[in-house]
Image (tube, rainbow, N blue to C red):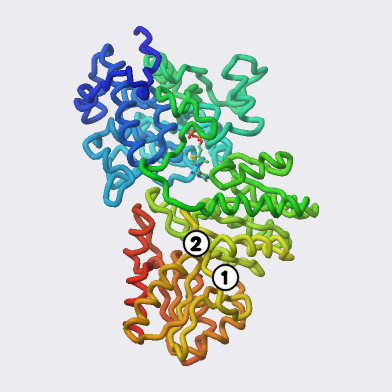
Amino acid sequence: MSSLDLGSPDVADPETPDPGIGVLAGITCPADLRELAVDRIPLLLAEIRAELVRHVTAAGGHLGPNLGVVELTVALHRTFRSPHDVLVWDVGHQAYVHKMLTGRLDRFGTLRQHGGLSGYPSRAESEHDLVENSHASASLAYADGLAKAFALQGCADRRVVAVIGDGALTGGMAWEALNNIASAPERPVMIVLNDNGRSYGPTVGRLAKHLGALRDGTASGNLFESLGLAYVGPVDGHDVAALERSLRAAALLRHPVVVHVVTRKGEGYGPAETDDVDRMHTISPAGPSKPGQDWTAAFGEALVRLADERPDVVAITAAMLAPTGLQAFACRHPERVFDVGIAEQHAVASAAGLAAAGLHPVVAIYSTFLNRAFDQVLMDAALHGARMTLVIDRAGLTGPDGPSHHGMWDVPLLGLVPDAKLAAPRDTTCLREQLRACAEHDGLSAIRFPRGRCGTDLPAKGRWGSAEVLLDAHDADVLVLPVGPLAVPALAAAEQLRGEGVGVRVVDPCWLQPLDPALVDGARRHRVVVTVEDNAPSGGFGESIARALRADDVRVVTLSLPEREFVPAGERGELLADHGLDAAGIAAAVRSAV
Ligand SMILES: Cc1ncc(C[n+]2csc(CCOP(=O)(O)OP(=O)(O)O)c2C)c(N)n1
């Protein structure tokens, strides 16, 4: 077969004609792709790239990773017979092309929208999707489990193929799985290593160096072969024929094997190829950006100020330097920022080590990924009295990334950690003050804020201990306690209710744990207390208030996300409204309680 690598035309180049979707529209399932004449493939690749760019630049999503796997996805579906053979996509953010080729092209325009296609594989959407967790480094464990099951069930003809990026390969889970996969030569799991040298930014650590040496032929050994895995590659990930040859050769080995595929993130789209920050790993929808600073940037600035005064402050990220706002700190104090790879457990446990030696580590992490490191927070940090700060971004409803990305478990989880303090700022002034207080705390503390813009400051009118009164109403017997920026809809609800003759006091608790006794005392002077939070209810703030007021004659209404349910994708504002956490929902809850 001759090489099909034509060099990707730049779909952003105005000189490049729009290829349409003449070939792509004819692919309704992978079998169509296998029957496609080889000379049609270059046009198919161009059509896929144009569709990716057209839709993702308009609606937002993971552009760079998908542009990088166009040829790889085509080759995988031409070589294997999904769903009989199982393709497991690590993270799943790079599965857009897979969606187009498995019968979802007509709905591609609904990607990541409320009621539309998920931004990750989705079992509800297709029999070709199996794993939708979107938390990195888990694909090899799934593959190991599937291969074990197929062996026991006598389905040895079903191939298991995991596609994992070099970034995801830095995660501990991947290595636990490799240890298992390599020890069973009779179970031929195929690991397709999609090596583009990047996570968001360049992949860090010694493993990344080794992959680089394997890529350019200067490695003195081969880590995978040393483990007992077969190794095929490196193969040009933008050459479909070469990919198909390598995948077939690897399948014929009937042995656990790593196929080392070298790709370029953002391939074929100039603005992505030249984006130094993250190759357009993920982009926002087109349109004017909303005014004001976002929470991540506000945290980044506050941390730089703090770190300028406190040489003991160091920062840790699990492969998300820019997305967690640490870029400015890294430019100013590069030696005080540690990117540990996609390794949240290591991030927290190594932070405990930094703390044990007298530094003050700040672990910047998305709420959903903190789930991975709960044991490290509890045992490695809290049990040892580690003085450290967790900065939890994307807390609460996050939006279009869906159930795996909503930050709805950090409050309940941290509620289990003895002596941990947890703050939720409502605006940037609070963020700065609370970050400082966290860094001064003699133990583990955390601060949580959502995705999006911060809005204007909401000044306090008074204090109840560490809680801040935002709206006082003479003789009010209803108290609303909003968590963090939910102060905004709470104040709007109070305004509406005032017009109806219902007096409402709004107090920002500021610290969700431990509960300030002054807040509890103030709350018990009301007939109705309404708490508002966008996290899971069990172990949430509302539950602690209700527990604290259990012996009092106070009606406590707790507004939160639903109990033990995964929340689907949607815009944050839309989802808040769906769950009664907007001004109208809060006002309605007060009306029915009084
Ligand atoms: C446990 C976990 N931590 C962080 C993330 C956020 N994240 C999504 S993709 C990504 C980088 C993945 O890099 P790689 O596996 O090399 O894939 P690429 O995007 O380069 O194709 C990260 C850090 C995640 N999904 N899961």
In the picture of the structure, the residue carrying the numbered disc 2 is 456
- The residue positioned 72% from the left and 59% from the top of the image is 386
Residue 282 in view: yes
> Looking at the image, is mark 1 or mark 2 nearer the viewer?
2
Q: How crowded is mark 1: few (under 14 residues within 10 Å), some or many (20 or more)?
A: many
Quadrant (top left, top right, bottom left, bottom right) of the N terminus? top left
- In the rendered view, does 372 fall on the left or right side of 96? right
Amino acid type assigned to the residue bearing label 2 in the image: Thr
The location of residue 429, given as percent across then percent down, is 59, 63
One can see residue 544 in this view: no
Residue 503 image offset from top left, x and y in percent: 41, 85
Residue 285 in picture, x, y percent from top left: 37, 42
Identity of the residue drawn at 31% across and 48% down: 113
Classify residue 142 as left or right of residue 182.
Answer: left
| Real-space Cα separation, disc 1 to disc 2, in angstroms | 16 Å
Tag of residue 484: none
Residue at the top extreme, as displayed: 2
> Which three-letter amino acid code belongs to the residue tagged 1?
Cys
Q: What element carries label 1?
A: loop
Q: How far across and down, in percent of the image, does residue 427 sit?
A: 53, 63
